[in-house]
Amino acid sequence: MKEKISQLKKEAIHEIKSSDTFDSLKKLEKKYLGRKGELTDVLKGLKDLGKDARKDAGQFANQAKQELEQALKETQVSLEQVTGVKIVTKNDWVDVTMPSKLSLGNLHPLSRVQYELEDIFSSLGFMILDGPELESDYYNFESLNIPKDHPARDIQDTFYIKGKKDQVLRTHTSNLQVRAMQEYGAPIRAIFPGRCFRFDATDASHDATFNQVEGLMIDKNISIANFKAIVDSFLSEIFNRKIKTRLRPGYFPFVEPGFEVDLPCEICKGRGCKVCKNSGWVEFMGAGMVHPIVLKNGGVDPKKYTGFAFGFGITRLTMMKYKINDIRHFLGSDLRFLKQF
Ligand code: PHE
């Protein structure tokens, strides 16, 4: 038996090695190793042998089979090299239409809403500006008409930097108002989205890190009516339905007059509930006409130009839009939360 196999192997390898086309290789593979191939035939005969002889001849036959396979492969590779043709077998190709096992990442909800805001304001002719999160006391406070001893600093307490007396983590995106005017002058239309920080105790609606967006529009004859038109149209876009806002007086040292803008309460649809303290409205943003002192600090002539500014929490807006009930989800890195967006 072993001799028969040995003889067969010799012949087969010789034929394979002298084969000079892919076609003949394929035929030889079939001739020796196919279902009705010669070596396969010999292997089938093993069952008639005694136990020990079967084991011995079986091992020998398997080794011969491997050698044939090896010879086939080698000859194919050298044929490929000679002809420059590559034979692709099923194991070599990738089906690009197969669904991937890797799950795709997605945008963080805050980025998603920020990008939406940027698109809406761009369509209204606003630039998108960025600026430092580590800011000088001057741009964060003084340039905005908030001197060192002003009580308005109390509600915007922040983090101070050791060894850098004049630097703070910015408490609002208003730090870019004067920077933007100095850079671009008037007229100007811009929004500044970004991260802000306050020394606040954390609870369901407060975090020491949060995102805001500031808006600034300065031109000749800008009035509160322009502000209301812009704000109502962007809110209607972002909520996908007509939104009515309510303006009431509010105090911020960098605007005059200043106001707070309220939105109808989402929870009770304006009827009155615990969340809105029965008023039907929830406070949404601070705004006002840019104070002449701030215009001057930005190098803009208050006799020629007027403008409005507003600022609100992207974090708060995202909570309203997606009905998220705890601010701590945003920076909690819990995939069960993040994967929903
Ligand atoms: N910076 C203010 C805040 O963080 C909001 C604001 C911006 C108010 C612009 C008026 C004008 O509360």
Image: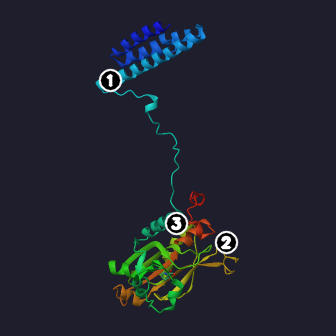
Farthest bottom residue in view: 149
Residue 200 at x, y = what percent?
A: 56, 79
First reached walking from the N terminus: tag 1 or tag 3: 1
> Residue at coordinates 44% horizontally, 85% vertically from top-left?
141
Amino acid type at mark 3 = Leu
Q: Which is nearer the N-term, disc 1 or disc 2? A: 1
Q: How many numbered tags mark residues here?
A: 3
Please name whichever residue, 259 or 155, is drawn nearer the observer in this view of the structure.
155
The percent coordinates of residue 149 (x first, y second) are: 47, 93
Identity, as a three-letter code, of the amino acid under mark 1:
Ser
Q: Can you identify the residue that label 3 sits on?
A: 110
Looking at the picture, does residue 297 appear above or below residue 48? Answer: below
- Among the 4 quarters of the image, the one containing residue 341: bottom right
Determine the secondary structure under disc 2. loop
Q: Residue at x 42, y 18 (%)?
A: 67
Residue 185 is situated, as x and y percent measured from the top left of the image, at 33, 80
* Mark 2 residue type: Ile
Question: Which mark's residue is nearer the viewer, 1 or 3?
Answer: 1
Check residue 267 in the rendering and tell me which mark sits there, or answer none: 2
Q: Secondary structure at mark 1?
A: helix
| Residue where numbered disc 1 is placed | 78
Residues at discs 1 and 2 in contact (Cβ within 8 Å)? no
Where 272 sits versus 107, above or below? Answer: below
Secondary structure of the residue carrying tag 3 is: helix
Name the mark nearer the viewer: 3 or 2.
Answer: 3
Label 1 environment density (alpha carbons within 10 Å; few <14, some 14–19, many ≥20): few
The answer as to whether callout 2 falls within 8 Å of ligand 1 is no
**Is residue 183 visible in this depiction of the protein?**
yes
